[in-house]
Image (cartoon, rainbow, N blue to C red):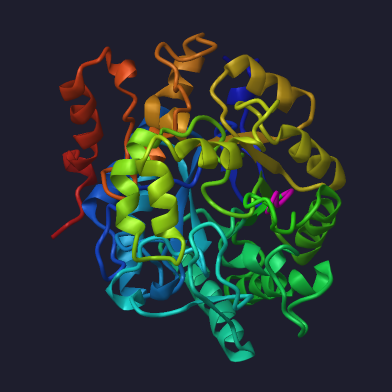
Amino acid sequence: MGNDVIFEPLKWRNIEIKNRIFRSSISGRFDNEDGSLSQTRVNWESKFARGGVGAIISSFVPVMLEGRIAAGYATIHRDDFIPLWQKVGEAAHSFGCKFILQLSHSGRQMDLPGVANQHRRTRSSTSKNETLHGFLTQAMTKDEIRQTVDAFAAGAWRAQQAGLDGVELHGANGYLITQFLSSGINDRRDEYGGDLRNRARFLMEIIQAIRLRCGKDFHLQVKFSAIDFNNVIPWEKKGNTLEEGIELAKMIEQAGADALHVSTGSLFPHPLNPPGDFDFDTIATTYDGMLASGMYTFRNYLTFRYPTLRPIFRWIWFRMKKGRPVEGVSIDQCRAIKQAVKIPVISTGGYQTASYIREIIGNGSCDGVSIARALIANNDLPKQWEAGRDLPAIPCTHCNKCLLNAPKNPLGCYELDRFGGNYEAMIEEVFSVYRTHPNLAIPT
């Protein structure tokens, strides 16, 4: 399909992607308590590389053990993890797929603390509790900021030593970098707070530190939220506007980033990210794992557990979704960013229709799209498009049951209707991530 823009190579400054489809950052709790990755991680990433995506953006990979969203996520905080990440990269490369490691730190957005994180206030730009779950926080000192900047640079160096194709800084969706960038969250009065340039100082220092450690030829991209929409709890500040998002994009480009990955929202999950439904029956069985994590988690659990209380949460959660599409939920924001910069721009937001993706790439709204849930539902989605389908044979319903199951269960598609009501077939597919191809096994 040589005339199909979806399958045209995307040539960046230092790497070339074989098509315009990126597996977005998503993974389950597949790894070990100490942060070392497991064979299941290799199996998971290989499913998407085999399915035909041009590049995989790894799941949230903390640069410090204390920076995990949840225990069971692999980290990049130790040198002896380099060979393990090398194995993941080699597995992706064996299918002609690039692998970009997403460097991250949860900050206050720590859903399921592990042994190393219990009984601690999490580091953030602020000492205010997070407002949806009530996670306890402590504003970082300048020494802690410097240590964290160094940890990001060291993580990028380890990714480079592992032979991975680049790194992405996760500056979106409410994690630590967002907590500095957002005017709705950052209440500091030093040089890391106040106007946008000060709020962006932490991110700019990370980019500079990575360039000093890894050189100018190692691919570096930044994921950030074009608009915060921070007022999920109605009385909260709205946070950064699109105008600030555009200015931030220009600053990131000037600082030396090679590409931008445009998202939306100041926490995760967010009503607009991922867009789609919210299944109360699912979260009522999984959210109890978070009860000890925050001050407001028991309140939330009650609204999920009891049908008479669900309308309260449904109104809060869905009021932002009104009138917005699922597919391309933030493409207008991405288009505005794309028009303001010269570096490539990736859009994320509910994509699975080939004709629509061709349209937004063709009209200059973005250079490529990143996908998570539709690829969980159909690992071979790019191959289905290449075979001529516009939508996959059994499309993703964007029910979000995959993510709502994630706190307690293996990540996978839990939409029973997609399996013809066959529960055993659904579980068989979810458990397929634990099966290892002999050529992809980590040596013991």
Residue placed furthest toward the bottom: 143
Q: Position of residue 431 (x, y in %)?
A: 20, 36
Q: Position of residue 125 (x, y in %)?
A: 63, 75
Q: Position of residue 138 (x, y in %)?
A: 55, 81
Nearer the observer, 405 or 61: 405
Q: Main secondary structure of the magenta part?
A: loop
Q: Report whether 17 appears left or right of 264.
A: left
Q: Position of residue 103 (x, y in %)?
A: 51, 62
Q: Which quadrant of the structure image shows residue 70?
A: bottom left
Nearer the observer, 430 or 161: 430
Residue at (61, 34) in percent of width and height? 369
Instruction: Look at the picture and state if 84 lies above or below 269.
Output: below
The quarter of the picture where the C terminus appears is bottom left
Instruction: Look at the picture and state if 308 lies above or below 200.
Output: above
Q: How many marks?
A: 0
Q: Which quadrant of the structure image shows residue 303?
A: top left
Q: Report whether 186 appears left or right of 6.
A: right
Residue at (28, 17) in percent of width and height? 419
Residue at (61, 24) in percent of width and height? 6
Q: Which residues are magenta?
A: 226-230
Residue 357 showing in the rendered view: yes
Q: Report whether 73 appears left or right of 174.
A: left
Instruction: Look at the picture and state if 170 lies above or below 93.
Output: below
Q: Which quadrant of the structure image shows residue 38?
A: bottom left
The quarter of the picture where the N terminus appears is top right
Instruction: Look at the picture and state if 404 lies above or below 427.
Output: below
Decide whether residue 243 is among the magenta residues: no
Residue placed furthest toward the left: 444
Residue placed furthest toward the front: 308
Residue 94 showing in the rendered view: no
